[in-house]
Amino acid sequence: MAKKGTAQKRPVLQWTMAGVGAAVTAAAIGLMAWEAVQPSAPPALSARIVKVETTSAGHVATVLVSNAGDDTAAAVSVEAELGDQTATATLDYVPGHGQAEAYVMFHADPRAAAVRVKAWSAP
C-alpha cells in the first residue's frame, strides 16, 4: 500500500516525448508565422517544348509551362508559332513553384516553334 503524500515519479520517456512534441509544435507555429509575413512573388511563367509525337493528324508538341513565382496563375494562355501556323492552348492553372503541360498540334515538325505565355489571371 502506498503512503499518502508521496508523489509517483513520471517516466523519463514520457517527459522526453512531451518535450519533443512541444518543440515540433513551436517549430510549426514559427514556420507558419514566418511564411505569413514574407512577401509573395507574382507568377513568373515560362514555356518550352519538351516532347514531339507524330500522329496521323499531324505533330503534337508537349509544352511544359513552369511557374517560378509564389502565386498561382489561372487561365494560362500559351501560344506556339511555326512559320505561318499558330497554335494556342489554355491551362486551368499553374501552381506557384510548379509546372503544367499543354499540347499543341502542327502540320510540320514543331521542334523549332517559338512558344510563349501570352496571358493569365489571378485565381
Image: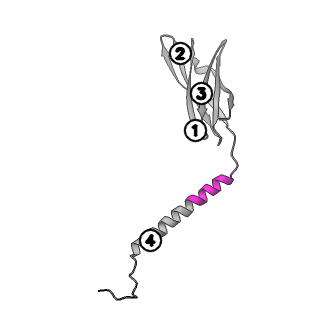
Q: Three-letter amino acid code at disc 1?
A: Gly
Instruction: Decide which of tag 4 and tag 2 comes sooner along the chain.
Output: 4
Q: Is residue 37 magenta?
A: yes
Image quadrant where residue 29 sits: bottom right
Q: Nearer the viewer, mark 2 or mark 3?
A: 3
Q: Is residue 38 left or right of residue 95?
A: right
Q: Is residue 79 above or below residue 98?
A: above
Give 64 or 20, whichever is nearer the viewer.
Answer: 20
Q: Is residue 101 magenta?
A: no
At numbered mark 3, what does the secondary structure look like: helix, strand or loop?
strand
Instruction: Decide which of tag 4 and tag 1 comes sooner along the chain.
Output: 4
Q: Residue tagged by mark 1?
A: 98
The kind of secondary structure the magenta stretch mainly shows is: helix
Can you give x and y, in whole percent of width and height, for residue 68 in the image?
Answer: 64, 39
Question: For the residues marked 3 and 1, what is the alpha-carbon distance in whole angstroms?
Answer: 13 Å
Image quadrant where residue 120 sits: top right
Q: Three-letter amino acid code at disc 4?
A: Thr
Q: Residue tagged by mark 3?
A: 91
